[in-house]
Image: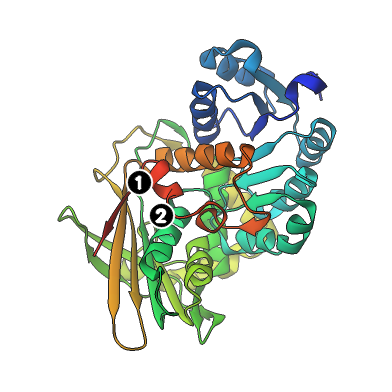
Amino acid sequence: MTRDVDHDEQTGAVWILGATGRIGSAVAGDLAVRGVPLALVGRDRDRLRKVQADLGKGDLVKIVVADTTEKIAEEIRRERPAVVVNTIGEYAATALPLARACMPDGHYVDLAADLTAVSRLLDLDQEAEAAGSTLVTGAGFGVLGTEALVVKLCEDRPTPARVRVDAIGSVAMKAGPLGAAFAAGMIDTLVTGGRLYANGRLVETRLGGDVQHLTLPDGQRVKTAGAPQGELVAAQRASNAPEVTVTSGLAPTGAIVRALLPLIGKLLSFPALRNFAVRRMAGVKLKATPRPRPHSWGHAVVTWPDGTRREGWLRADDGMDYTANVAAETALRLARGEGKPGAHFPAAALGPDLAVAAGGTFVLN
């Protein structure tokens, strides 16, 4: 491992892990424009240098070359950055050692959306609070775009009986490999299987069930289906509702594919098959395609015991770009000391208006 940092210069900086990827480089660009001192962290020195040159911010942007989670954690403990933004994926494995390396006093942000990863980070709540650190998981379109809605709809209201949230992303695909982070997330969703909250408990359900036919506020129609995502836990924590479900626009809605999902999930639960599938999927070459709809939409329906029902939407543009905006805005606010210590989802840590600051618009009924 080689290092291109000066210890004193980098104190207080925001470190971006996976800085050469689509999200990481976008977060770097956003923060560099605001004059935030940065460290770009990754495995490939030449690619890091290119991102550094593209930013054109001179001494404000350093690089750290490290090729394993352990080495990155070692550098975090050595340099003590103010905030670490983890975009490298495999969050169930990478989040805990990296978040712990930030403590005490440093803060951590990741983009995790799978149940295993977000739950593991949230389990660090007491440890982070005692250390004076804020750990934020799910800093992206799906989690924040639904969590913030639930918070807004439940403001000044008693505990609801039921909540359903739907994440309907619209993403323009760039030419190139799918990437390990996205591939791992898709595979782990299949392995986890369906989940929902019933009587306040997280229980199993059929993956791809609960198919919804939704009419978006702009008049377009979409189909979504149940998937075990971090949005589920975020919505339950935001509302305390005993009954919570989640659907996703990324989940398959075709009858044949949905019927095969349980078998596929069982096969991929074997580590060797799972890792093989992630590697193969990560290398799939994508063609550049425009996003399928003008907007990405978060959606929430909240129902109270007396039958009162409220519905709301959060409109964003490209879901991937919005995720980068959320991560950057979260990091900036944590660097300013605005987060409360502990482990949280983004709206819980910084308030639902974070979703607006990142470029979203609430459409509340």
The picture places residue 37, in percent across and down from the top left corner, at 63, 23
The picture places residue 233, in percent across and down from the top left corner, at 53, 68
Three-letter code, disc 2: Gly
Are the residues tagged 2 and 1 within 8 Å (C-beta)? yes
Observer-nearest of 281 and 125: 125
| Residue 252 image-quadrant placement | bottom left
Q: Which residue is mark 1?
A: 360
Please tell me whether mark 1 sits on a helix, a strand or a loop: loop
Residue at screen point 72% across, 49% down: 133
Above or below, comparing residue 79 to residue 293 in the picture:
above
Mark-to-mark CA distance, 2 and 1:
8 Å
Observer-nearest of 123 and 48: 123
Residue at screen point 35% across, 41% down: 318
Please tell me whether mark 2 sits on a helix, a strand or a loop: helix
Which disc number belongs to residue 219? none
Which disc number belongs to residue 145? 2
Above or below, comparing residue 246 to residue 117 in the picture:
below
Crowdedness near tag 1: few (<14), some (14–19) or many (≥20) residues, C-alpha within 10 Å: many
Residue 74 seen in this snapshot: yes
Residue at screen point 32% across, 88% down: 306
Q: Relative to residue 354, is residue 289 drawn left or right?
A: left
The picture places residue 113, in percent across and down from the top left corner, at 53, 56
Three-letter code, disc 1: Gly
